[in-house]
Amino acid sequence: MRNAGVWAGALLLGFAGFIFWQSLSFDYYTVRGPGPGFLPLWLSGVLIVISLVYIWEAIKKEVIVFKQILPKGRALGNILSMLGSIIIFMIVISYAGFVVSAVILLFIVLVREFKWYSALGISVVTSIIVFLVFNSLLGIPLPVNALGW
Amino acid sequence: MDSFIQLLQGFETALTWWNLLYCLIGVTIGMLVGVLPGLGPTTATALLLPITYSMEPVTAIIMLAGIYYGSLYGGTITSVLINTPGEAASVITCFDGYPLAKQGRAGTALGVAAIGSFIGGTVSIIGLAFIAPPLAKLALGFGPPEFFALIVVGMLMVIGLMGKSLIRGLISALLGLILALVGMDTISGAVRFNLGQDFLMNGLDFVTITMGLFGLAEVLIGLEERMNAGKPAKVKGLLPRRDEWKPTLKAIGRGTGLGFLIGLIPGSNSVIPAILSYSWEKKIAKDPSRFGKGAIEGVAGPETANNAYSGSALIPLFTLGIPSSPTIAILFGAFIMHGLTPGPTLFQTNPNIVWAIIASMFIGNLILVIMNLPMAGMWGKIAMIPTKLLYPIILIFSVIGAYSVNNNLWDIWIMFIFGIMGYLMKKLDFPIAPLVLTFVLGELLETSLLQSLIYFNGNVFGFFQRPISGTLLVISLLVLIISIFTSLKKKRGILASDVEM
């Protein structure tokens, strides 16, 4: 199963099926006219049909295998480190506040391209500036730690 | 005459120091966005939208609109100087702009583009000022069936014009519509598809989704194919030679008309007028072989056309409340966020705001032409900012942007998921613009459809008994049939790209 198109189509089919099944629990028609189940049922129904056509196309007409589209080597590392940095950011932010978690987020991404001390320097300076601008100047209540940053 | 007086009053508002400042900030950010490959106008407008919460509506929209039309100017510079288009509409400019730069005439290419952009942009705003009010008046008579039909036409145009395959365009559009259903239904009050989560009660937020689909996804794609910008060419002399003036001005004239007309069609995008203008110029040229080797008309025409488009593309938004492209959809969001409803009533309920925005666009175009003519070389240097530094900064801004929509960490997760989704969609060649547009229009589509069906007692053919809705639906059927035909014949050529504006 190396055909990426088929997987994407299956995912779509699953999503459309789920919405279709959920739509059945809403009124399709009420005394006043079409109910909340009307449009979702139709949209997901059409999406089911089109997903099937897409899967057929992906098998018969235009085969896209994972190897063609997935990044390799350094590029893959770049992408995984960026996604990972966001996940770590989200875990840390509730405990350590915005500045610390933003430094971690930026450092993870930057350290792949810069020397570690430059990466750390850029991360710290950027995070503090961004915090001051958004939190203090623009009044967006960014999550903070016990010390207020 | 009425419009003229109101326009003058608009200038009164737009020329206050505060609004001038934000207009300047907006067009400067627009230039930056245009110049920097990897940062698109949709992401930039979405990022700045939450920041405008505390601003006056008029000031906020003046600034966001500045980003929108400013980015069209900026994209030209990198196309000419380093052969890298900063945004999609400037792809065409590379064809002749870069050869001109190699001949040492970068200045001329940029000068002509700036003059053309200014003329195209200004004429189309004049058009906007005089066509929009009567059109809005006409649209006041529209009921739910007409709006439903209009939305369907717009959506089908987007699907028909974008992406290599009709099937993928349709999937993208249907995903947008289904995602728009999440949350409380405005008609029945039923809560749908919220997976039992309270934070999804109000539905998914448009800004969060766009930030993921465009901002984060763009960064992910960019991390993969990191390119090193070439050294920009030197800029000398900004005006064409004496014998080139006449053909240049003619090309600018044609580009203006073409761009303006295409902007009026709901669902069109800024690349279409540029491409059409280029092929038109090539077709009528005495010596078409010059094109691709540095023909000045090949720069003047398309650059004018996409700027002329930018003004008239706001007409469907101002008069009907229907955005044509993802960037205009964010402007739509900005109107709503500030308590204004774009659509036929806008000119009546908030004339001062609309006219001030229109007036600010004249001022913005003037600022842009000044920024471009003498300062083009400087902007070229900005494109040299290494992406390894740029991408992490876009990332942190996207995270804050998503958070600041509701000051809620859940929104960052939603952006994260849509970022991965956008990345995969780009990889599999699914166009993203249809998803965003149908998402914005989803709620209006459902209410207008349900209200119409209630009115017609459930009879679908009722739509065809009203002249305007009937005609529009027939047009959309034709668009659909033509799209099916072109995709079967594999004739979906250069028009089929995924575009943000």
Image (tube, rainbow, N blue to C red):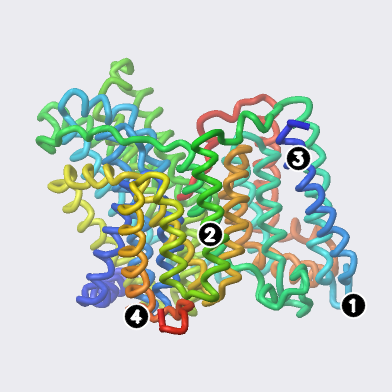
User: Which three-letter amino acid code belongs to the residue tagged 2?
Assistant: Ile
Q: Earlier in the sequence, mark 1 or mark 2?
A: 1
Q: CA distance from mark 1 to mark 3?
A: 41 Å
- Image disc number at residue A7: 3
User: Which three-letter amino acid code belongs to the residue tagged 1?
Assistant: Val
Which residue is depicted at the point 74% across and 32% down? A3
Which one is nearer the viewer's eye here, B269 or B133? B269
Which residue is depicted at the point 10% across and 35% down? B236
- Which residue position holds label 4? A136
- Image disc number at residue B106: none
- Which residue position holds label 2? A86
Q: CA distance from mark 1 to mark 2?
A: 48 Å
Chain to which the residue tagged by mark 2 belongs: A
Query: Which dot, 1 or 4, sits closer to the camera?
Result: 4
- Which residue position holds label 1? A31
Q: Earlier in the sequence, mark 1 or mark 4?
A: 1
Disc 2 and disc 3 in contact, CB within 8 angstroms? no
